[in-house]
Image: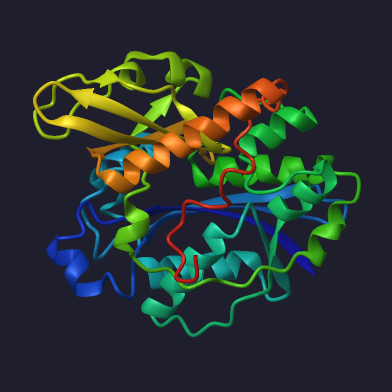
Amino acid sequence: MQLIVLDLEWNQPTSYQSAAYRRVGDRLLFEVIQFGAAKLNEALEIVDTISIPVNPTHYQTIHPRVRRMTGLTRDVLCDAPAFPEAMESFMDWCGEDCAFVTWGCDDVSVLQQNVDFFRVERPMPKMYDLQRLYAAEAGKSGQTALKTAMEALGVEVDEDRSFHNAMHDAYYTAQVLRKLPRPMDVLRYEEQPRKLCHNDRRSRFRVTDLVPSVREALEGEALAAPRCPTCGQPTRRQTALIPQAPGKYVALSRCQQHGLMFVKIRFSQLPDGQKGMHLSVLPANRQTRAYVHTKELQYQYRLKRGDYEHVDVEDLSAAFSSNMPFEDA
């Protein structure tokens, strides 16, 4: 059996009100725009790599964030094959007896959604999640960024291999696999695709800012004086930023014109190793005021008890497991 370390890049709708999303969004939330893979021999040496760009046929406008991170543009992709042809070429390169190894479950789910949508009839090989093996070996829980795992295992970044290029990320994933003490244990972590769907409730927790660190963000101007959602003016914080759980904080802040505001902050560890923040500022009501005051009392008690003496605010491994909008999440 040939191990194929697989990574994908995909596009998404620029708006959930767009015509493209209204046509296909319930069946195709993300559209694959690049296959990248590394083929390993029995000694887990890389014997070949491949990059196949894919011309999107539905989300033809590349989302600005995707374009910025991947460097893939309409000009780059316009002459590339559509998904069915690209998938066929990729599977021919993989060979008949193979298995996919990915970093996390996101690629598996996106690939399956594209296969189903475009009615690719070629059977899919089994897929295994290296991220779960790494977590078990490192004694971690939740999602770990590939870059973080590389740093922990001493995998050096190649200046000619940028992140968010599917072939380069597949290469780095293969290097992480080779560094683990029992790499073939990855076959214990078979991954099943999960159904993806847009969910308005989850979409509120998108990343709105990249931050250098959680500590710097907590001490920065954006959280010292969160802006009022109505007038856009800085508000005056009335409470500390009160931790609820890893990466989650709440506070109350006051706008001179529009009164008390309920502030929610959520930090996330992104797959490329960067940290993201989502800031929400909403008019406070009786329930949210009471909620913050209760959390503040609990925080002060735990602070005096010493519960926070050894807490690392930068550790977001237990914050949440995935940013992907899975149907069962």
Residue for point 60% across, 64% down: 93
Give the image's coloring scheme: rainbow
Q: Position of residue 287 (x, y in %)?
A: 32, 48
Where, by quadrant of the figure, is residue 281 drawn?
Answer: top left
Image: 16 above or below 169: below
Location of the N terminus by quadrant is bottom right
Left or right for 288, reference 229: right
Q: How many marks?
A: 0
Q: Nearer the viewer, residue 156 or 310?
A: 310
Q: Residue furthest right?
A: 181
Residue for point 25% across, 65% down: 57
Residue for point 28% across, 43% down: 73
Image: 293 above or below 218: below
Where, by quadrant of the figure, is residue 98 drawn?
Answer: bottom right
Q: Position of residue 117 (x, y in %)?
A: 37, 77
Image: 35 above or below 46: below
Q: Is residue 162 visible?
A: no
Residue for point 27% across, 24% down: 226
Q: Nearer the viewer, residue 9 or 310?
A: 310
Q: Position of residue 38 (x, y in %)?
A: 65, 51
Q: Position of residue 283 (x, y in %)?
A: 21, 39
Q: Is residue 306 visible?
A: yes
